[in-house]
Amino acid sequence: MLRKIIATSPTWFTVPVRLALGAVMIAHGAQKVLGSFNGPGFKTFIANSTPFSFMRPTWLWLGAAALSELVGGLLVAFGLLTRVGAFLIGCVMLTAIVGVHWPGGFFAAKLAPSPSLRPFGGRSLSKRAQRRASAAPHIGRA
């Protein structure tokens, strides 16, 4: 199972999606966790209410959501455990879309990039592919 999660192949087409999703989610998570970009910060964010009544204790769910956005964005952007990062982001965004934005008619565009990375992983620019390429013997080099 771990091999499936960390497996990658030399394809470049996921790189722009991965970098864009990673940048947006790092910034979004940094607002909530670190208070950067005029964000509320961690203590203020976890004091809010959750979108669903079954999410108790609220500080636990909101803390997990904030950390999932930040850590998931970092994982996706760096191509390290991209599927795990995409799963974390997908869970948070699905909850946000259904619980917060759906009643107001929000278009679900934020969810689209995350599942598109899950089948493919980080591919060519992932840390694993770079390590594999540097460890491979180079033919024709002196």
Image: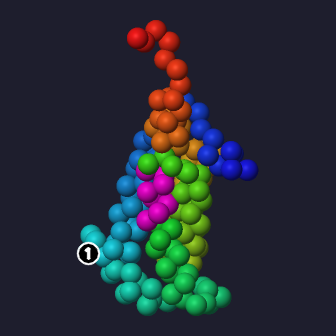
* Residue furthest to the top: 140
- Asked if residue 106 is positioned above or below residue 78 in the image, the reply reads below
Instruction: Name the residue: 61% across, 90% down.
Output: 56
Q: Which of these two is toward me, 21 or 96? A: 21
Residue lying at 33% horizontally and 81% vertically, measured from the top left: 40
Residue 63 shows in the view: yes
Name the secondary structure under disc 1: loop
Q: How many marks?
A: 1
Residue in view at x 58 percent, y 73 percent: 95
Label 1, residues with CA under 10 Å away: few <14, some 14-19, many ≥20? few
- Residue 39 visible, this orientation: no
Colouring chosen for the image of the structure: rainbow
User: Foreground residue, 127 or 52?
Assistant: 127
As displayed, is residue 11 above or below residue 1? Answer: above
Residue at the farthest right position: 1
In the rendered view, tell whether residue 21 sits above or below residue 133.
Answer: below
Q: Position of residue 54 (x, y in %)?
A: 65, 88
The residue at the far left in this view is: 38
Side (left or right) of 96 relative to 40: right
Across and down, in percent, residue 55 comes to: 61, 86
Tell me if 7 is positioned left or right of 35 in this view. right
**What's the amino acid at mark 1?**
Asn
Quarter occupied by residue 27: bottom left
**Coordinates of residue 1 in the picture (x, y in percent):** 73, 50
Residue at x 68%, y 50% (from the top left corner): 2
Query: Does the magenta segment cover residue 76?
Result: yes
Estimate the x, y position of residue 11 in percent, counting from the top left. Answer: 53, 31
What stretch of residues is rendered in magenta?
70-77
Magenta span dominant secondary structure: helix
Q: Is residue 5 above or below residue 124?
A: below
Q: Quadrant of the C terminus?
A: top left
- Kindly identify which residue carries mark 1: 38
